[in-house]
Image (spheres, rainbow, N blue to C red):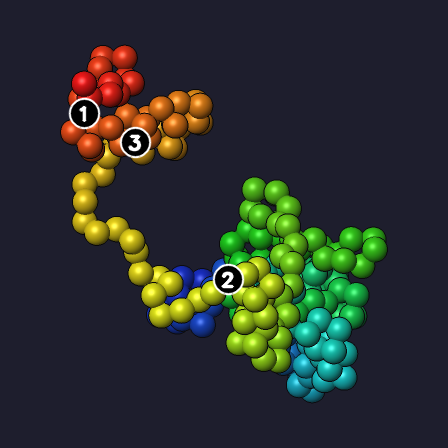
């Protein structure tokens, strides 16, 4: 039975079988024994057990990829993936291989994600809908002494962090919705001083007129 037609139900006598995509994923980076049969199905020849990806090629693959090549992953526990599967005539060469972690290897074989090598040698991943996945920038370098670097950054910006830096200044008073709207709404910027003046006069016990401007006490 060829690997393309390898399928089953996952129960009973077929408990070791699965979809063609699953069998191709498992065979991407595995041991292989070639058996030849005659027209009646009898075994006539059994080849030696070999690795689909030889050890020397696997070391070169690890040295080149340094982990899972799926954008944003980089996990070091990986499996070798044939960009064009060997069962479909793809060669087991460095240019036709890429490292993928188990999760993303499954995504490429069984969940519709695609990966191909462009003419310039870079890999391009695509979503199941065909849209390309953007590359994720590498994480920022962590300094040898991150606490010292943080203090130096604060000093350069004039920040003084102390024990009460994170304590709020709110004392439990109710929210003045009108004042909040005046402050936050971009069209109320020009009217903000008059509003503040009204609030000051009102808090002093002077009623504001209908026009919004406070009257001086007589």
In this view, 33 is above or below 40: below
First in sequence: mark 2 or mark 1? 2
Tell me which corner region of the image, top left, top right, bottom left or bottom right, holds residue 31: bottom right
Disc 3 secondary structure class:
helix
Spot occupied by residue 92 in the image (x, y as percentages of width and height): 75, 70
Disc 2 secondary structure class:
loop
First in sequence: mark 3 or mark 1? 3
Spot occupied by residue 129 in the image (x, y as percentages of width and height): 56, 42
Q: Nearer the viewer, mark 3 or mark 1?
A: 1
Residue at the (68%, 81%) spot, across then down? 51
Judged left or right of residue 203, residue 10 is right
Q: Which dot marks residue 206? A: 1
Say which of 153 and 55 sits in front: 153
First in sequence: mark 3 or mark 2? 2
Judged left or right of residue 212, residue 115 is right
Disc 1 secondary structure class:
loop
* Residue position marked by numbered label 2 in the rendering: 159
Q: CA distance from mark 3 to mark 2?
A: 29 Å
Spot occupied by residue 11 in the image (x, y as percentages of width and height): 36, 67
Q: Nearer the viewer, mark 2 or mark 1?
A: 1
Residue at the (68%, 74%) spot, across then down? 66
User: Are the residues flagged by discs 2 and 1 in contact, CB closer than 8 Å?
Assistant: no
Q: Is residue 215 visible?
A: yes
Q: Is residue 27 visible?
A: no
Residue at the (29%, 53%) spot, across then down? 169
Say which of 81 and 23 sits in front: 81
* Residue position marked by numbered label 3 in the rendering: 179
Mark 3 surroundings within 10 Å by alpha-carbon count, few (fewer than 14), some (14 through 19), many (20 or more): some
Say which of 8 and 65 sits in front: 65
């Amino acid at each position: 039975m060829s690997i393309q037609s390898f399928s089953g139900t996952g129960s009973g006598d077929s408990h070791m079988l699965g979809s063609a995509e699953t069998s191709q994923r498992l065979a991407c980076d595995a041991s292989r024994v070639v058996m030849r049969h005659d027209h009646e199905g009898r075994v006539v020849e059994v080849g030696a057990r070999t690795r689909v990806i030889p050890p020397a090629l696997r070391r070169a693959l690890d040295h080149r990829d340094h982990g899972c090549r799926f954008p944003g992953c980089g996990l070091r526990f990986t499996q070798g993936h044939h960009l064009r599967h060997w069962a479909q005539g793809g060669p087991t060469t460095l240019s036709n291989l890429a490292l993928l972690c188990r999760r993303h290897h499954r995504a490429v074989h069984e969940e519709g994600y695609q990966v191909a090598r462009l003419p310039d040698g870079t890999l391009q991943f695509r979503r199941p809908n065909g849209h390309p996945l953007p590359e994720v920038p590498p994480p920022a370098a962590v300094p040898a002494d991150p606490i010292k670097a943080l203090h130096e950054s604060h000093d350069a910006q004039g920040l003084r962090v102390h024990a009460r830096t994170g304590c709020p200044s709110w004392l439990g008073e109710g929210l003045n919705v009108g004042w909040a709207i005046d402050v936050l709404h971009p069209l109320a910027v020009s009217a903000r001083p008059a509003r503040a003046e009204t609030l000051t006069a009102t808090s002093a016990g002077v009623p504001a007129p209908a026009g919004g401007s406070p009257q001086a006490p007589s």
